[in-house]
Structure formats: structure tokens, C-alpha cells
Amino acid sequence: MQNTEIEEEEIVKLLKKLMIYLFGGLVTRMGSIILLPIFARSLEPSEYGTLELLNRATDLLILCLFLNGVCLAAISFYNQAVSEEDRRRVVGSVLVCGSFFIGLIGLAALILAGPIAVLIGVGNTGLVRLAFLAALADALPSLCLALMQAREEAISYTTFVTIGFVLRVGLIAVFVCLLGWGVAGVLRASLIASATLGLVLMTLELKRSGLHFDRQTALSMVWFALPFLPGGICGFLLGTGDQFFLAQYASTAQIGLYALGYKLATMVSLFTLGPFMKIWAARMHQVAREPDAPRIFGQIFTRFTGVYLLVGLGLALFGPEVITVLARSEYLGAVRFIAPVVLAYFFMSGSDLMDAAFYVQRRTDVKLWINLLSAAIMLALYLVLIPPFKGLGAAYATLGGFIARMGMTYLVSQRLFRVVYEWDRVAILLLAAIGCWWLGQFAAGPVWVAVSVKATILFLFPAILWLTGQVTPQEKQALVGILDRTRQALGKRGGFDLPGGPANVIQSSGVRELRDS
């Protein structure tokens, strides 16, 4: 009995930490959403394009710092240490190694800022140096936050992440919106916020653990971090590397439009795949042990497809209205990039779901080769499509690269863990979404008329699936049950006693069906 109580207490503690970390992750993700209208309303498209090019350059700088690998090494080595002295050596080695890479590679980047500015199409060496300084200043608090994660200090971690976020947003609002400093204001705000947070965290870390550097531990951590470099470069090319190629053939204003459309399109994946994977990543291993696991994995894929396409269709239809609310009228040209990138990230999300086979069978090494081949294909598509078609070429290159990535992931994953995919249903879902989007292109007239027509078309998508039998009877039963339970919960909160009747029977079995599947 006592052991059971201890286990329950540990589970409660774990869940509390999980919720705190989730809040911290939500804060950082919301940052990009909150800053988007600030940038799009305060910066010209050319300025926004310049900022995005600088962000891509700093992304590469962070990759060269091995920052992600060093942070993962900090968490791994710290938790494998057997004594307090060993843990202090890990902390000292992390801080020394991290500071060494930051200083060495940062110095080289600052010296080469002039050629880099010409290469990425910015032309302003001062802005490039300022962007690099902001990125280097942000690297130091990242190391300290990784050590907090290693110690499972969830409250401290989330507190400092939130402080850094609020400080950065506040300074950007002052420098950009009030003082009108433009791109330089964004970079100065980031530099001040990161440097302040890094100074505070570094002081606290040294006061707590001291600086106990160990050469052998440091070398082991470097070897641990090195393999993350090629994977990170592939991820960069698959994600936002197209903007460097676009800089050679398009103006910074066109890059700004493309970057805004791209960022809006990726929000679909952020609000669908992101939350779903937090649940599915933990449950997939349990489901994989079930006798009918191949069928369940296939159904999960189909149901995620339906949710993603519904959200993606909504964004693709109401793209002009969303941009009108978030940005200035000069950014309306970003609309044409939303649909192809939404579709591209559908295939990216699909391949991420297929990755379950690699995790279930513990063959994550295979992912590196898939990413390398995908990056090579994407690179070739960039070279072929971007010169003649510019932004649209970049969008369709992204689409082609992610289709190739999903195809390779499917072929390899099926050899490791067979899944019975419902390709007929997936194809109908995809074609119905594309057809509804096509109809939406004819919506014209006053704003209220266009919005009404688009809302009708958006509702038409699930209605078609429901009436044509693409939603199975079990799924219908589950959805009706969930809606009925939600209705009753809202009724009780509002002080109303809503009638139940036969729907209660549907609710019970429907929720159970959805839970079990």
C-alpha cells in the first residue's frame, strides 16, 4: 500500500512538472504569434524580408555553435553523473565548452560579416553584426536553461523563459513601434534581453556550482554533440533554407511577402501536429503492442489528416482576411504562398507521423539518411524552381521536397513496422479539401459576402465527408457523443438543465469508442 502511495505521489509530481514545461513551451511559441502583427504592421515588406534573411543567417550560426547538441549533452551527462562532484564537472564543462564555441565561432562570424552580408543579400554589414551579436547573446542563457532542465527545475526554467520573453517583447514594442528603429530595433531588443538574461543565469549558475572544468568530460560531450550538426543542417534546408536561394533572385520585399505567407502556413502544423504529438508520442509505444496496431496506426493517420486539412483549408480560404487583420495592405501579396505551403506541411506532418515506426523499433538512425536524401532533393528543386518562379518556385520546391520525404519515410518505415493506411480515405479527404479551396477562389464582392461564402465552403468540407460515408459510423457516434457531452457541460456551467434523453446513450458509447481507438 505504501509503495502504491509513493508511486502515485511521483506521478503527481511528474504531471505538475510536465504542465509547467508545457506552459513554458507555450510562452515561447506564442512569442512568434504575438510578434507577427508587430512586425507586419511596423515594418515594410522589404524590412521584414531583411529581418527574415538575418534570422536564417543566425540559424546557421547557432548550428555551427553545436548549441542543440551541447544542450542535449548537458541534460544527458548531468543525469548520468553518479556524484555531486561529477555533476559539477558536467556543469563546468558545459559552460566552458559552450563559451569557447560561442567565442571562437562568434569571432569568426563577426570578422566575416561583410562577405556574409553580400552572400545573403542584405548588404548592411552593421545589421549582420548586430544580428550575430544577438544570436550569440541568446546562446549563453540557452546553456544555463538546459542545466535547469537537467535538474528538473521546472518552475525556475519556466520563470526565466517567461521573463526573457516579456523583456524581449516589451523592448521590441518600444524600439520598433514607439521609436521606429525598424530592423535594428528588433535586433537591439533581442541583444539586450538575451544579454541581461544570460548575465543573470550565468551568475546564478557559477554561484551554485562553481566552475569545475574536466577535459575528458568536455571531449565526451563534444563527440556527443557533433552528430547533431548534419541533422540540423538538413532540417534547416528542409525548413527555411529556401530564403537564401530566394535572396539571389528576388527583392527583400518579395522575400518579406514569402516569409509572412510561409509563417502563417506553418501555424496549421503548430496547432495540429504539435499538440497531437505531445499525446501520441507517449501513447504510440503502448498502441504498438496491441494485436491490431497496424489498423489503429492507419486510422490515427486518417483522422489526423481530416483535422489538419480542415484547419489548413480554413487558413487557405481566409488568408486575405487574416493578413488584413495582422498586417498592412502591402503584405496582401503573401496570400498566394499560403496554400502551397499548407499543402507542403501536410506531407511533412504525414512523414512525422510515419516516424512512429522508427521510435517503436528504436531505429532513429535511419532518419538521418532520409533527411539527407530529402535535403538533396529539396536543394535540387530550389535550384530548378526558384530562379524562374521566385517565391512560388520556393513554395512548390518545399512541396516537392516534403512529398519526397514522406514517400521515403513510408517505404522505409513499412519495412520496420507495417501500418495499414487507409489511402482511399486519405485521398478523398485531400481531394475534397483542394476542391473546396478551388471554389473559394471565386468568392468575391463586399467583405461580408466573401466571408459568408468562404464560411459556407469551409462547412461544406466536413459536410461532404459526413454525407458520403467518409466518416465511419463509429466516428460519427464518437463525435456526436463528444458534442453532446460538451453541450451538457456548457449547460451546467451556465446554470441550465439541458435535456439528455437518448443522446446520453450515444455519448457514452461514442466517447468510449473514440478513447479506445
Image: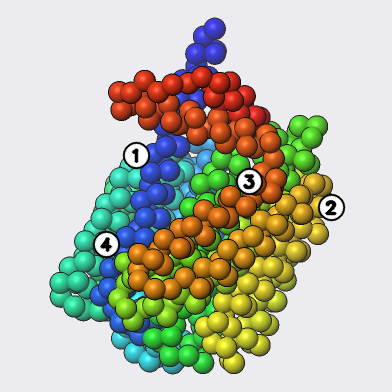
Sequence-wise, the earlier of marks 4 and 3 is 4
**Residue identifier under label 1:** 155
Q: Amino acid at mark 3?
A: Trp
- Give the numbered dot on residue 60: none
User: Does residue 218 appear to the left or right of 168 in the view shown?
Assistant: right
Looking at the image, which residue is at 24% across and 58% down?
167
Labels 2 and 3 touching (C-beta < 8 A): no
Dot 4: within a 10 Å radius of its alpha carbon, few (fewer than 14), some, or many (20 or more) residues? many
Tell me, for residue 168, which label it has, or none: 4
Q: Residue at x 56, y 33 (%)?
A: 480
**How far is disc 2 from disc 1 in space, using C-alphas?**
43 Å
The mark nearer the N terminus, 2 or 3, is 2
Residue type at the position of mark 2: Arg
Does residue 486 appear in this view? Answer: yes
Q: Are marks 4 and 3 in contact (CB under 8 Å)?
A: no
- Nearest to the eye among marks 1 and 3: give it: 3
What residue occupies the far top of the structure in this picture?
1
**Residue 155's image quarter?**
top left
Q: Secondary structure at mark 1?
A: helix
Of circles 1 and 4, which is in front? 4
Within 10 Å of the Cα at label 1, are there few (<14), some (14-19), or many (20+) other Cα atoms?
some
Q: CA distance from mark 1 to mark 4?
A: 20 Å
Residue 464 percent coordinates (x, y): 62, 52
Which residue, given by chain and number where applicable, does mark 3 sit on? 466
Point out residue 207 in the picture as x, y percentages from the top left corner.
29, 47
